[in-house]
Image (tube, rainbow, N blue to C red):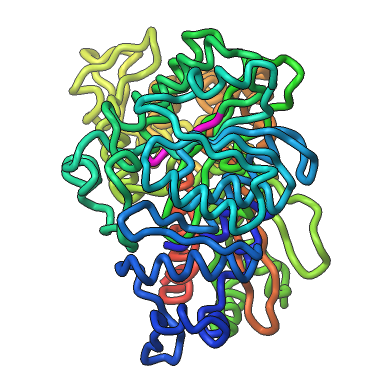
């Protein structure tokens, strides 16, 4: 996976990667390492140290006017990744092109950070190095680029970081320090043994470098902790301390170490290039410095979230239009109105809160608030609900007793008594003869009760009959008089004023405090077809939105495959 789109926004290679074919035509030393694949594309074998060195030298020459020499047995830097670090330092110190002073700890044979910083921004550098070969090459590279007045390369003893290097520079306050520390603790770790996730692909480029460049006691974690220890003594001698990290797992313990030491200003970032990720940590003891937000967080906030989309083709839309009258749509509805109505019906069935929101003329938008996952295991849930209804106890209202014989008998006996419960059909017939049209009118009044659906703006008529609702049957058949029947029916079927207020006023989707997720559904016409887009707004888990999207799509297709009522 390429990470070039996540490079620093000022990196010149972010949107314009190197053109190998052009560079090969201009630089013969680079041309010998470029080959053409079957698709006619110029390629480079990054497993060859000579090819990697040729690319680095060519890019520095073409884009920065720098000429360098690098031995194959020492670390060969990649230019785009180092350029990310330079741009981030610019963000830390608050600008580019201004005269600044910095320190490069372990500059390497290429001396690439001082060369880039000096040539691009005119920065002054103190570059330290412990390896003799690297020191000689770094000094030569500075001299052949005529940058000796800006870059000073010094040889320091082993394990020297900042303290010894600044002994002779006691009067200078530096703006920053940079460091590309040794990432590994031993040879096995450098080869990826027990240090690299087995699921990750192998490195795409060769790993070059001397022992002092790639390995240190305790690896990069202990190396950076030593720099932190030096910074606690130097404090305001440098405005910003920074280090690059090769492992993300090193970031958290180092930030925790800085927190324990009471360092007031700490930030971090990510460096992306090709398939390579690096991390960087910076801290300061100055109160007036501006701490930039991590680009990784900015990238997540600014990243455009692609909506979930599915398309309904013209034949599907026409079939749904032909069945739209079954769900209460007017005749000849527009395609967008038809699909929106079907979605609203499905959402109502799922008890998902929604409301229409303003949108363009040729589209419809629904704002959804999902409180419960009701779209999975729907068939099992319906079976369980039916089983629960069948197993409901047939007990009469409190204060009325029944016996098994009274339930099955057609005519009350002395043993049954006046409070017995005969069969419902017999009582219904008797009561009709006794009260005439009174019972019929009472049944018509209580046959349907409007209940406000919590997910829609329309009333849903909950139809019930004495043969379906057990509690209504018992309430009607257990009472000997019409007055008592009316009282029982009112008690069982008609909600109180408080209950009615709760039922008839569903909670607004935007006012729900506890929810799984919120999303925006856009239904819009695209020529003869209709597109449905679902945009994430906020919530706990995007996977739930993916499931809901799949459910809505499959429901529409099932309606077409098996029309309602068949």
Nearer to us in this view, 283 or 74: 74
> Magenta residues: mostly which secondary structure?
strand
What is the x, y in percent for residue 355?
70, 46
Q: Split into 4 quadrants, where in the image is the N terminus?
A: bottom left
What is the x, y in percent for residue 212?
32, 39
The answer to whether one can see residue 191 in this image is yes
Name above or below for residue 293 compared with residue 139. Answer: above
Residue stretch in magenta: 242-246
For the point 34% across and 62% down, the residue is 205
Q: How many marks?
A: 0
For the point 41% across and 82% down, the residue is 34
Name above or below for residue 4 compared with residue 255. Answer: below
Left or right position of 458 against 221: right
Q: Split into 4 quadrants, where in the image is the C terminus?
A: bottom left
Image quarter of residue 159: top left
Left or right position of 283 against 120: left
What is the x, y in percent for residue 110?
48, 53
Nearer to us in this view, 99 or 300: 99
Name above or below for residue 252 compared with residue 234. Answer: below
Nearer to us in this view, 276 or 169: 169
Q: Is residue 14 magenta?
A: no
For the point 73% across and 61% down, the residue is 364
What is the x, y in percent for residue 420?
31, 18
The answer to whether one can see residue 477 in this image is no
Left or right position of 402 against 138: left
Nearer to us in this view, 282 or 566: 282
Left or right position of 129 against 489: left
């Amino acid at each position: 996976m390429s990470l070039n789109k996540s490079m620093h926004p000022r990196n010149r290679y972010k949107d314009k990667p190197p053109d190998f074919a052009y560079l090969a035509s201009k630089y013969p030393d680079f041309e010998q390492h470029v080959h053409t694949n079957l698709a006619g594309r110029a390629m480079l074998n990054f497993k060859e140290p000579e090819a990697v060195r040729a690319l680095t030298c060519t890019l520095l020459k073409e884009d920065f006017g720098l000429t360098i020499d690098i031995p194959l047995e020492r670390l060969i830097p990649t230019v785009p990744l180092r350029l990310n670090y330079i741009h981030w330092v610019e963000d830390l110190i608050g600008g580019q092109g201004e005269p600044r002073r910095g320190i490069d700890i372990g500059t390497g044979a290429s001396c690439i950070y001082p060369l880039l910083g000096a040539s691009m921004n005119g920065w002054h550098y103190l570059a330290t190095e412990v390896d003799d070969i690297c020191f000689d090459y770094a000094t030569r590279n500075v001299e052949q680029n005529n940058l000796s007045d800006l870059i000073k390369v010094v040889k320091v003893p082993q394990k020297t970081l900042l303290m010894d290097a600044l002994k002779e520079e006691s009067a200078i306050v530096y703006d920053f320090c940079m460091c590309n520390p040794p990432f590994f603790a031993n040879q096995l770790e450098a080869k990826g043994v027990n240090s690299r996730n087995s699921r990750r692909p192998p490195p795409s480029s060769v790993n070059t470098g001397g022992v002092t460049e790639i390995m240190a006691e305790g690896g990069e974690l202990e190396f950076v902790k030593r720099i932190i220890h030096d910074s606690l003594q130097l404090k305001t001698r440098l405005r910003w301390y920074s280090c690059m990290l090769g492992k993300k797992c090193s970031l958290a313990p180092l930030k925790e170490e800085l927190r324990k030491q009471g360092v007031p200003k700490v930030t971090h970032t990510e460096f992306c290039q090709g398939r390579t990720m690096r991390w960087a940590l910076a801290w300061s003891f100055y109160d007036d410095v501006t701490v930039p937000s991590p680009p990784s967080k900015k990238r997540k906030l600014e990243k455009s979230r692609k909506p979930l989309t599915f398309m309904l083709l013209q034949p599907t839309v026409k079939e749904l239009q032909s069945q739209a009258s079954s769900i209460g749509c007017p005749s000849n509805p527009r395609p967008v109105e038809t699909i929106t109505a079907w979605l609203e019906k499905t959402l109502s069935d799922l008890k998902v809160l929604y409301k229409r929101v303003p949108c363009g003329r040729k589209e419809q938008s629904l704002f959804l608030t999902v409180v419960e996952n009701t779209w999975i295991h729907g068939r099992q849930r319906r079976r369980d609900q039916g089983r629960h209804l069948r197993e409901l106890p047939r007990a009469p209202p409190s204060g009325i007793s029944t016996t098994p014989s009274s339930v099955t008998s057609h005519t009350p006996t002395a043993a049954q008594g006046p409070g017995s419960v005969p069969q419902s059909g017999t009582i219904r017939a008797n009561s009709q003869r006794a009260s005439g049209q009174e019972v019929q009118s009472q049944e018509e009044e209580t046959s349907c009760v409007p209940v406000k659906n919590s997910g829609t703006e329309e009333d849903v008529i909950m139809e019930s009959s004495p043969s379906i609702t057990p509690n209504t049957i018992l309430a009607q058949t257990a009472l000997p008089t019409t007055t008592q029947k009316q009282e029982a029916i009112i008690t069982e079927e008609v909600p109180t004023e408080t209950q009615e207020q709760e039922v008839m006023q569903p909670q607004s989707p935007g006012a729900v405090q506890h929810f799984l997720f919120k999303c925006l559904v856009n239904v819009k016409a695209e020529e003869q077809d209709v597109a449905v887009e679902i945009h994430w707004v906020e919530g706990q888990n995007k996977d739930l939105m993916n499931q809901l999207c799949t459910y809505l799509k499959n429901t529409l297709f099932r309606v077409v495959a098996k029309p309602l009522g068949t």
